[in-house]
Amino acid sequence: MRADALEGGFADPAPDAARAFRAIMEAMARPGTIHDLVGAAPPAPLSVAAGAALLTLADGTTPVHLAGEADCEPVRRWLAFHTGAPVTGAETCAFAVGTWAALLPLSSYPVGTPDYPDRSATLIVEVDRLAPEGATLCGPGIRETAELSLPETRAFAENHARAPLGLDFIFTCGAQVAALPRSTEVG
């Protein structure tokens, strides 16, 4: 094991993971809100927020797909050491991480089944910016409407139309996170 893989995890794992989990759950419960997600120092090209999300959500039973530039040896070693998560293809993953372009096509990921809609993938999408502007969101957790800068709107509208099946999305930028569950309508 290379020394660089040993670095970049949570300094104080239990409280750091609890804070990160809370930020991710707040983002999922209130689509369109942006939260700080800190505590990790993953290897490039992963952002701090993407690293913290993986440290919090992945473990040895959680297959992770690394898309595009995220699929590199430093990230693979770091993920293996800190989470034990197996790296897999898009079609069998529970989580996927990468840029929007690298994660496409969305049809590659599991969307659950009528009996088990929870057996779908969550995509951790690395974006250049997160802002409370752009696409209009409505649905559970949103008082009237919210706005969030999204890489596009059509794919998310189509994803919502499949609910309760579909994908969930976590957007990361630097040390910030926002989320878009499949229950959110995007217009």
Image: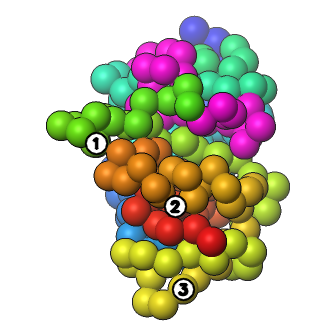
The residue pinned by badge 2 equals: 180
For label 3, the crowd category at 10 Å Cα-Cα, with few meaning under 14, some 14 to 19 and many 20 or more, is: some
- Range of the magenta residues? 82-106
Amino acid type assigned to the residue bearing label 2 in the image = Leu
Residue 28 part of the magenta segment:
no
The residue pinned by badge 1 equals: 118
Q: Where residue 109 sits: x, y (%)? A: 50, 30
Residue 100 part of the magenta segment:
yes
Q: Where residue 79 sits: x, y (%)? A: 53, 25
Q: Could you tell me if the residues under marks 3 and 2 are in contact, i.e. CB atoms within 8 Å?
A: no
Give how far apart the Cα atoms at labels 3 and 2 are: 13 Å
Amino acid type assigned to the residue bearing label 1 in the image = Asp
Which residue reaches farthest left? 115
Q: Could you tell me if the residues under marks 3 and 1 are in contact, i.e. CB atoms within 8 Å?
A: no
* Residue at (69, 72) in percent of width and height: 135
* 87 lies above or below 19: above
* 119 lies above or below 175: above
The residue pinned by badge 3 equals: 145
